[in-house]
Each structure stands twice: as structure tokens, then as C-alpha cells.
Image (tube, rainbow, N blue to C red):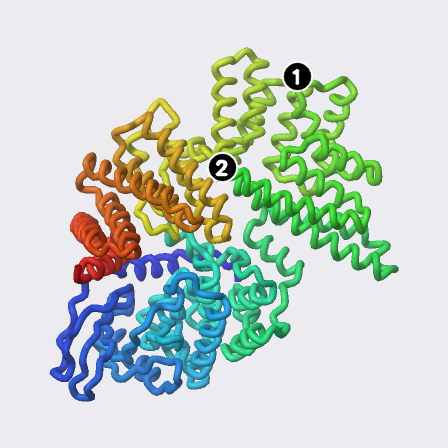
Amino acid sequence: MNEPLGERALQRLLAMAAAEGDGLAPPPLPPRYELVREIGRGGMGVVYEVIDHQLGRHCALKTLGAGAGTDDEGRRRFAREALAAARLRHPHIAAVYDATPDYITMQLIDGEPIAAAPAIAPRLAVELVRDAALALHHAHEQGVVHRDVKPSNLLVEGGHVYVVDFGLARSIDAASSVSLSGVVVGTPAFMPPEQALGHGDRIDARSDVYGLGATLYHCIAGTPPFTARDLPALLRRVVEDDPRPAARDRDLDLVLAKCLAKEPERRYQSARELAEDLDRWLRHETVRARPTSFFYRVRKRLQRQRTLALSALAAVTVTVLVLGPIALGESAARAAANEAVELAGHVASVLQEAELFRRLGDSDSADDELEVGIDHTREFLGRHEVPRARYLLGRLLRAREEPDEALVELDRALESEPDLAEARFERGLLLAARNDLGATERATAIADLGAAAAARSVLRVDLLFGMAELAKLRGEHQQAMELLKEVLEYDAMHVPARVALAKAARALGQASLAVYYSASALNVRQGFGPLFLARESTTLPTSILGLEGALVDYSDKVRHADDHSPALAWRGLVQLRRALRLEREGSLDAALDAAQRSVEDHDATLKLHSELAGALNNRAVCSMVVDRLQAKTGDGAAAAEARAKAGADAGAAIELDAKMPAARFNAGLVALRQATVLRALGRADAAATQAEAAVKAFTTARSLAPEDWPHAATCAQRLADAATIAAVPR
């Protein structure tokens, strides 16, 4: 399942997402219903708590919104589908009582979404998802598929899970034309690829299995399988990318991977199969899910990232050719050949991940990724002496900036196989980078780079760089400069090309240009790469998924500044993302260090531009993360200091820009956090005072925010939390 995301499907999903937050007034209701309160709202409508006086019970009543298709025929279809779901009877399914073209009434569950409970234990999450899977299997047996399985639709009440919102379901055997006005229904972060692509005729029980897997992943990892800064990027990740392992338990990760397979035929074929495998895991038995084959992963990599995949595939091909003759005759050699193929794919993946981390300015994570690949390759070489494996080790060592060790491995590879062109090209690049080449080494480098045409797995951008290095060695500096500029047209963040351009400029007597390329190389290496992308302006991220605080983009205010303030701000947010990732992984000390670095980068920005309300606001968010991490590590005094700094920054941002909703929201978060701490210390009066300040801040933020403000739902929830604390008798 790697079909590109169609424009039509993308536009439908964007329209669905845009429908969220629409102000929908409750429809006229029969006299039997009394409206109590609004429970929540989303792209499909608004949910209210009502009292059914005829039956003497509280119910959840859902109106239909733009996301459901509000034309008359669409509403009638929706009602028919909801009534089909009403026949479901299962202890883990919230019942549908009634449906009309205007509303649906359902069993009211006084519980929380499955992922809302803090630090939910993986075993408990597995038990709850298993029960939900059995409930969905019952629905599938009755011919009904849910289509919107996600954490907020699995409610936990007293340790009992309920699958809710079957009002969005449809009959499995219904024709594809009987869909909700052609709208793709579901929540992007939890929908399967076939749903994201708009293939309504392919949505079946296995689509719900995907939703269960994505929900369990979220419970364990604290984040959905795929996240992104905007909806189009998220949808493309759902269709094209594979999720990273989340459980740190091999069997459970295999179960999750099977649930989240791109192709429905590779998932569990029923929700009951998933429930049975989860039961096996709970009983500490071997699960039936198995890892995907290496050749399947290579095929998917080819479809997703064709250029990089072709490089990896070429490496695999040569490995097989080298080992093929002996593999036919000896079982041990055949096993070595299979391992070599796996190794080539593994190294390609490691190099790709490490490069991504480097471009985010996260050198520590890049080095960690490369270290794993180096250890894995050396472990293979301890059992099998294969020239191509030596070459792969040389590539990893060069990427980790250990050129002397890399040269040793490449020389060993070429001793055994002198015609291994990829190894010669790699050695040529390493030698050309040296400043003190002797005549023999220069001749070797020129010969090695000249052999690049025979290296089938060399990417075009690397080949261009190699030819530039060859021109430099021959003293053709102007030609080298032209080739290096072409490298930057392919890849504006290519650090070695910028370094080489600086050298070429110096050789040509262009001192100012040499300084520029030297400085730009350093800036890119430090995570400032976006400044050098081929765009007219640089836009900083406006949000980080998984972060409660509200960030703002103030790049337009410093776009023409003659300093590095935009780059400093970018690096600060890179460090913040790294801190959040490390926190999720349980590396609290490293996370705290990254969060403190994010504050320091904003400190540097504000030294250059003290008037930037946006930078003050963003530094407040970074300090809030420091507060949380200090509290987790047991340093209450340091946490209080960070919290005070966050509050001061939010207040200063408000003074500079009184109409910034993000600053008001962040001030409310700081006050609410302080109220929570004070209440835990038994200081009820002080806690109530802080809670009242939070209520005021959240209320003002809501009044200033635009209708499509992404933090609106969180703001409303935190406002309710603050009001609860403020209302406690003193």
C-alpha cells in the first residue's frame, strides 16, 4: 500500500478537518429530551448530554455536522447506518438507542478515553484493547464496520472499556455509493491507508484492526504512530511511512506492526485474531505475528524513496553476486548470504536515519543511530569475512566522522576485492577531504574517484560531489565550484559541499565567498539548515505535536535581520523536539539537557531582539518543559524556578503583545500548574488564587483566538480544570 495520496482524497480530508470546531447549535429536540450540557465536538458534529424523560435515563445525543454530510440524503443515509449499528449488543459496546436524520442518541459513558489516563501500563492497555477487539469482532459479525477507531472512541469507565460512536459505522456489505456523501470518515492520525486514500470500497473489518493497533500504539508510546506539523504531511506519512517500534517488547511490537501493515491483507484478518494474539502476549506465550521479510521491506523502500532504495538494492545485489556461488553449495554460506542481504538493508536504513537527525541539528541522536549500525556490522564481520560488509562499515564510520578507521576498513575490503567500485569511490572521497595529501595518496584518490562510473549504487548527488572533488585534486577549481553549486541545487543542506566550496573559493582568491560558505557549513551542521533552503523566506514550526504549550511563528519579524536570530530560534525548537522525544523514551537526564539548551537558544535570540513577544512566548513553553522534567527527576526547587521563569516570560510577551492568544494560554498553563502544586502541598487558598488567575487567562485566550485556533479544545479543557480547583471551598 504505497499509492501516492490523491489530490481528491487529500481535499476531502482537508475539508473534513476544517469542519472541526464549527459552531453547531443543538437541533430542535422532541419533548422527551432535556439538554444538560455539551460534552464535546469534532468534524462529525457535536455531542450533548441529555435526559430521556420517557425512559428516565441520561443519554449522549449527537448532532450531525459538515463532516458527516448534511444534505438531506446524506443525513438519511447516516441515520440508516446508525440504526443498523443499534442492533449491536455487547458488554463492551456503547449502545445506540435511536437515530433520526438530525441526531443520534447513545448510551452515556462516564469515562475517559483509553489514552487519557496518565502513564497507562502497557499490560492494562493490552487488556483493554483486547476487549475492544472482541467487541468490534461482534460488530463485524453483524455486518457493521466502525471506521473511526481511535483513543477517544474507546472509553474506560471503572476499568471497563466501551467502544463508542458506532453512529459513524456502516454496513460492511453496503455499496461504496452508500458512503457519507463521498466524504472519507475517520481521524487522520488513526485511519488506515486505504481510508486516507479515499478507497471507501476497501474499508472493512481489517480497517478497524488498523485503528485498534494505532490506538494501542498511542497508549504505549504516548503519541500516534504518525505525527506531522500539518494535515497533508500527516496523511502522506500514513500512506507511505512505517511506524517506529514503540513497545520495547519484541512480541508486542510484532503485534503492532501486523495491525499497522499498509496492505489490509497483511494485517490480522479479523479483530478476533488480534484479540487472540493479545491474549497470547498476556499469557507470556509466543504470538503468531511475524516480522516482515527483508525483500518485502526492500520493495516498500523502493516505492517510498526510490533513489535511496536503489542505492540499497544495488548494495544488496552485489552482496548476493559475491556470495551466490558458495551459497548454492553450503547451508552455512547460504545463511551468511541471507545475513549479508539483511545487513545491507539495515545499513541503508541507519544512514538515512542518521542523516535526518544531522539535518535537525541533533548530532547526538545521529551518532547513536550510527553506533548501532557499526556494532551490528562488526558483529556480522566477526562471523563472516565479506568484502562488501567491510565497505558498508567504512561508509558508517565515514558518516560518524571517523575517517582513519573508515580508511582501514575500505582498504581491507579492496585487498579482498580490488574491483569493488563502491569501496574505491568511498575511499577516494575520504582521501580527497584531507588537507595534506602526498603524491601517492593524491594519485590513489584521483584513480578511485575516476572509477565512480562503475559504482552502481552511488547516488547522483554523491557522484556530482565526487566529480567536484576529482576536479579539485586536478587543480580545476572553477569546474569544482560549478559542480559543487549543482550539488547544492540537489541538496541545499549538503555540508561537505559547502566546506569544499569554501576551499575552492579560497583557491580562486574569493575570500568573502570563502567566508560565507565556511559560515554556512557551520550553521547547517549546528541545525540552522532551513536558512539555506532554496526558498524566499524561512518559516519556523508553529506547533510541535505532543506539546501542550502554544508556540508561535515570529520569523516574519526577523526575516531581514542581519544576524542569526531565525537560526537560533529554529535550533531552540529542534532541541525542544529532541527533549520531548527523549522524555517519551524515558531518558529524562538527556531530555532535561536538551530542554535547557532550547531555553539557552531562545536566550541568545532575545539578547539580539529583546522586543520579540513571540520569542518570549516560545521560551515560556521551553521553560514549562524544563519544569515538568525537573519535577520528574525530583528537583522541586529547580522545577519551581523554571515555572517562575515561564510565567515571567508569558507575562512579558503579553505586555508586548496584548492580543496574542498563545501567550495568554501559556500564562494560564503556568498558573494552573502552580495551583496543582499548591493544592498538593495543602495550601488551598493559594491554589484557588492561582486557579482563578488561570481561569482568567484561559478565558481571555479563547476570546482573542481565531475560530480555527488549534489549541481551542485544550484551552477549554484546561479552563474546566482550573475552574474546578477555584471552586473548592477554602
Residue 487 spot, x, y in % from top left: 55, 31
Q: Residue furthest right?
A: 329
In the drawing, does residue 443 fall left or right of residue 567?
A: right
Report crowding for label 2: few under 14, some 14 to 19, many 20 or more residues within 10 A (C-alpha).
Answer: many
- Of the two numbered discs 1 and 2 on the same chain, state the one appearing first in sequence: 2
The residue that label 1 is drawn on is 475
Residue type highlighted by circle 1: Gly
SS class, disc 1: loop
* 611 or 669, nearer to the observer: 669
Q: Quadrant of the C terminus?
A: bottom left
Crowd around label 1: few <14 · some 14–19 · many ≥20 (10 Å): few
Q: On screen, 706 above or below 174? A: above
613 lies left or right of 516: left
Position of residue 389 relative to residue 32, above or below, is above
Nearest the viewer among 304 and 209 is 209
Image label count? 2
At 33% from the left edge and 44% from the top edge, which residue is drawn? Answer: 640
Indicate the position of residue 341 as horizontal and vertical percent values.
Answer: 72, 53
| Residue 620 at x, y percent in the picture | 31, 41
Image spot of residue 46 (x, y percent): 23, 68
SS at mark 2?
loop
Q: Nearer the viewer, mark 1 or mark 2?
A: 2
Q: Which residue is mark 2?
A: 361
Q: Disc 1 and disc 2: Cα gap in Å?
A: 33 Å
Residue 162 visible in the displayed image: yes
